[in-house]
Image: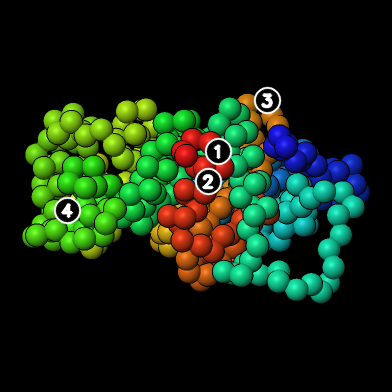
């Protein structure tokens, strides 16, 4: 069955409560990086603000940020650290229209859809039946390949498995990846797999430890740094397989953000946390489906930057779909607890997950 986007229903602003609501209050930021007292902090949902008697949607949003009214009337959602002195910031702590602010949490709900007050197995665990989720995901990815933007957030687990690397490579090469967020480890061990057929010194197929294998990832980092970039390393060493190889080959953008424990790191890894967050948000602003796989910190970070909706060029409001996949229930529930309208969590080994998805899409036998 072909995937169909749900229809977005905006609030009925002809209701008396909206007509009678006041304009949202606005106050200037007192200094760079500081919001005025009483600032309104955004959620992941569509939010409307009444200005000059008209209700307007903030089109590019994220959690935990302020809303700035620009001179041309545009509403920009800005992290407080990025506010500039004099920015006109919207004030208000209520969300039902009383202060000219309305958070629209049910815009994608199906009319007349009812839920039982009590039902078994509503949580997501290893015992959950996921067959329908896989079918829906493959249908969604086929749609997004042509009409959307698919962003993957990946931990290093993929680089440790021969089939998982092949599966992700196949997805990239067949157009099912428009961007990737990861850390130093994913890129390092994937390149180690391509260069030496090991990850942390173990053969990625047999899992047999190689002599002096604990040097392998360090040798790869050193060799990439000598080349000056991942792309140049791929050319210099004639790399012909793997995740990073496929991203470079197909001009798919990626952002690698570092951590305090990183070895090296690779040349492209961003060590400044806030610079890295900004680069991540640059890709997240474009995505319409985001799939987070076996990386708790990157999952939480990406989830906090991702709104539940996107406004397209023609003005259509559509959902942003979020998936979190991990063998640990705690990790996926961290994303589910955000309350997103469109978050789906799957508790499973991500290596199995990615091979099932690639086979479901017919890109790998």
Residue where numbered disc 2 is placed: 357
Residue depicted at x 37% and y 42%: 166
Front-most of residues 252 and 170: 170
Q: Residues within 10 Å of mark 2 (few under 14, many from 20)?
A: many
Closer mark to the observer between disc 3 and disc 2: 2
Instruction: Determine whether the residue tagged by mark 2 lies in a helix, strand or loop.
Output: helix
Q: CA distance from mark 4 to mark 3?
A: 47 Å
Q: CA distance from mark 3 to mark 1?
A: 29 Å
**Marks 3 and 1: CB-CB under 8 Å?**
no
Residue depicted at x 64% and y 54%: 131
Mark closest to the chain's N terminus, 3 or 1 = 3
Q: CA distance from mark 3 to mark 2?
A: 31 Å
Closer mark to the observer between disc 3 and disc 1: 1
Residue where numbered disc 4 is placed: 217
Mark closest to the chain's N terminus, 1 or 4 = 4
Mark closest to the chain's N terminus, 3 or 2 = 3
Residue where numbered disc 3 is placed: 314
Give percent across and percent down for residue 174: 46, 30
Residue depicted at x 86% and y 59%: 114
Label placed on residue 72:
none
**Marks 1 and 4: CB-CB under 8 Å?**
no
Instruction: Determine whether the residue tagged by mark 4 lies in a helix, strand or loop.
Output: helix
Residue where numbered disc 1 is placed: 361
In-image side of 248 versus 138 (left or right)? left
Give percent across and percent down for residue 110: 82, 48
Residue 142 seen in render? yes
């Amino acid at each position: 069955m072909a995937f169909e986007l749900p229809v977005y229903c905006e609030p009925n602003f002809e209701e008396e409560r909206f007509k009678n609501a006041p304009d949202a209050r606005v106050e200037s930021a007192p200094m760079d990086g500081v919001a005025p007292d009483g600032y309104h902090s955004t959620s992941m949902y569509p939010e409307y603000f009444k200005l000059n008697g008209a209700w307007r949607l903030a089109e590019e949003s994220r959690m935990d940020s302020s809303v700035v009214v620009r001179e041309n009337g545009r509403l920009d959602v800005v992290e407080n650290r990025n506010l500039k002195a004099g920015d006109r910031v919207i004030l208000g702590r209520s969300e039902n229209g009383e202060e000219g602010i309305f958070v629209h949490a049910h815009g994608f709900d199906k009319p007349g859809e009812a839920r039982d007050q009590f039902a078994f197995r509503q949580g997501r665990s290893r015992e959950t039946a996921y067959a329908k989720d896989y079918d829906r995901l493959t249908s969604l990815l086929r749609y997004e390949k042509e009409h959307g933007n698919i962003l993957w957030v990946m931990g290093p687990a993929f680089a440790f498995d021969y089939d998982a690397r092949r599966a992700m490579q196949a997805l990239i090469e067949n157009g099912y990846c428009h961007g990737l967020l990861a850390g130093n480890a994913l890129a390092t061990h994937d390149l180690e797999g391509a260069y030496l057929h090991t990850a942390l010194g173990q053969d990625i197929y047999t899992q047999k430890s190689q002599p002096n294998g604990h040097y392998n990832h360090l040798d790869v980092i050193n060799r990439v740094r000598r080349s000056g970039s991942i792309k140049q390393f791929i050319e210099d060493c004639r790399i012909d397989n793997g995740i990073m190889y496929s991203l470079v080959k197909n001009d798919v953008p990626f952002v690698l953000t570092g951590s305090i424990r990183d070895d090296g790191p690779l040349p492209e890894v961003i060590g400044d946390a806030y610079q890295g967050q900004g680069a991540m948000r640059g890709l997240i602003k474009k995505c319409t489906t985001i799939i987070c796989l076996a990386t708790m910190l990157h999952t939480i970070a990406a989830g906090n930057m991702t709104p539940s909706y996107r406004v397209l060029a023609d003005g259509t409001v559509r959902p942003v779909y979020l998936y979190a996949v991990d063998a640990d229930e705690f990790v996926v529930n961290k994303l589910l607890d955000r309350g997103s309208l469109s978050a789906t969590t799957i508790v499973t080994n991500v290596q199995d997950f990615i091979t099932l998805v690639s086979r479901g899409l017919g890109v790998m036998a």
